[in-house]
Amino acid sequence: MKLALKLVAAVLVALVLGAGSALLLVRSGGLGGLVSSGPWETDLTIGSAEADPYTRARVAVAGLLALNRSETIYFTAARDGEGDRLRTACTYRVEGSNPPARWWSITLYGEDHYLVANPQNRFSYGGETVLRNEDGGFVITVGPEEADGNWIPTGQGHTGDTFTLTLRLYNPDESAARNPSGIVLPQIAKEACAS
């Protein structure tokens, strides 16, 4: 009887450790081919035949309806240009010009990987909807207080919560698809935080 109890306990411990480590890998980023360009990161294996089971599970959890890598490159920023976590209580300046792709978009997601509710129902800007500067570049303000021009609200009542920005490059140029870390992507600068 003692042997059977020890065996059951060992199996339960193995199941908990196995499931826990798999969940940790899925939520933390897996073991894929991570590359970055400033604060933006992408995994070269997402949407490719090289994706391991953990990467595929991570996409299933966080990247609903993700397209094949040959069609889209997904960059995510969880930190600003100084390396600090993006927080809903802070205001950020996202500044850049058109990335090398047929079409692009920048979208704000909450910690749960879903759009953050806001009264304006504004979650994203793209190459055809963003207001541009005279030089063709753009500035998007991301923060809790309404701003003139391009503004993505971080939601209300979420002080201290974190968020991510996802930059999608649809039909990227061939050079961008070959070397995503060589792309010049928008800068993310923290401007102010509510206390």
Image (cartoon, grey):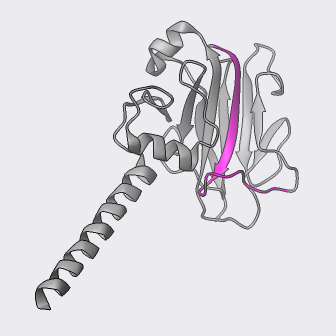
User: Is 173 drawn above or below residue 114 in the view shown?
Assistant: above
Q: Seen in the image, is 146 located left or right of residue 7?
A: right
Residue 109 inside the magenta-drawn segment? yes
Residue ranking furthest to the left: 3
The percent coordinates of residue 2 (x first, y second) are: 12, 90
Q: Quadrant of the C terminus?
A: bottom right
| Residue for point 33% across, 40% down | 31
Q: Quadrant of residue 152?
A: top right
Question: In this view of the protein, can residue 79 be seen by the observer?
Answer: no
Q: How many discs appear?
A: 0
User: Is 75 drawn above or below residue 92 in the view shown?
Assistant: above
Camera-nearest residue between 1 and 135? 1
Q: Which residues are magenta?
A: 101-118
| Residue for point 37% across, 37% down | 52
Residue 1 inside the magenta-drawn segment? no
The percent coordinates of residue 1 (x first, y second) are: 14, 91
Q: Quadrant of residue 12?
A: bottom left
Question: In this view of the protein, can residue 67 be seen by the observer?
Answer: yes
The percent coordinates of residue 166 (x first, y second) are: 62, 37
Q: Seen in the image, is 46 located left or right of residue 159?
A: left
Residue ranking furthest to the top: 174
Camera-nearest residue between 145 and 33? 33
| Residue for point 66% across, 65% down | 159
The percent coordinates of residue 139 (x first, y second) are: 73, 30
Q: Seen in the image, is 24 located left or right of residue 69?
A: left
Residue ranking furthest to the bottom: 1
